[in-house]
Amino acid sequence: MKIAFTTSDRVHINAHFGWARLIDVYEISDEGYQFLETLNFEGDLKEDGNEDKITPKLDALVDCTIVYVTAIGGSAAARLIKKGVTPVKARSEEEEISEVLNKLVQTLKGNPPPWLRKALQQKPSNFTDEVGDEATV
């Protein structure tokens, strides 16, 4: 599964979702994790009530299961959840991405807590899966 982190230094989870210029994406399983890419966002990202500025982030994160943030607005959180992405607030801006990844790997090896099991199960199937299912009915 893919996990994303809002960051300003690519080490810590230290960026507000709406303001984040960088979002690092990792692939994770119970065997470990691997860095996939850094998503870069340009333009005026400061808080201004402009909901359209988060649309590119929502679209870029659609295949992620979880996105870790320091903060996120209610509207953005709701829009992520609607797309099947679970926003999770970091403990602090000092929390390191690698620490969270290592904890998640260990958690996946054992018995994931209910919130993580729910996040893993709620990922919607993609459109081609749905079309394929309808074709076989």
Image (cartoon, rainbow, N blue to C red):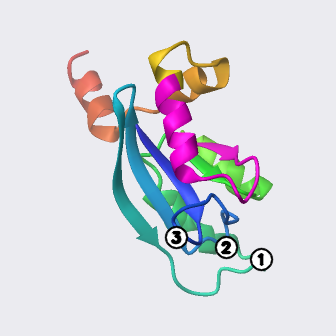
Give the magenta part as a residue range: 85-106
The one of 43 and 106 positioned closer to us in this rendering: 106
* Residue 51 relative to residue 11: left or right: right
Amino acid type at image mark 3: Leu
Q: Residues within 10 Å of mark 1 (few under 14, many from 20)?
A: few
Q: How crowded is mark 2: few (under 14 residues within 10 Å), some or many (20 or more)?
A: many
Q: Would you say residue 121 is visible in this rendering?
A: no
Q: Residue at x 75, y 58 (%)?
A: 71
The one of 64 and 28 positioned closer to us in this rendering: 28
Tags 2 and 1 touching, CB below 8 Å: yes
- Residue 135 location, x and y as percent? 21, 24
- Residue 17 location, x and y as percent? 66, 63
The one of 73 and 105 positioned closer to us in this rendering: 105
Q: Residue at x 56, y 75 (%)?
A: 21
Badge 1 or badge 3: first in the primary sequence:
3
Q: Would you say residue 133 is visible in this rendering?
A: yes
Tags 1 and 3 touching, CB below 8 Å: no
- Residue 55 location, x and y as percent? 56, 66
Q: Which mark, residue 47?
A: 1
Q: What is the quadrant of the C terminus in the image?
A: top left
Amino acid type at image mark 2: Trp
Name the mark nearer the viewer: 2 or 1.
2
Q: What element carries label 3?
A: strand
Q: Which mark, residue 22?
A: 3
The span from disc 2 to disc 1 (Cα, nearest Å) is 7 Å
Q: Which mark, residue 19?
A: 2
Quarter of the image where one finds residue 38: bottom left
Quarter of the image where one finds residue 82: top right
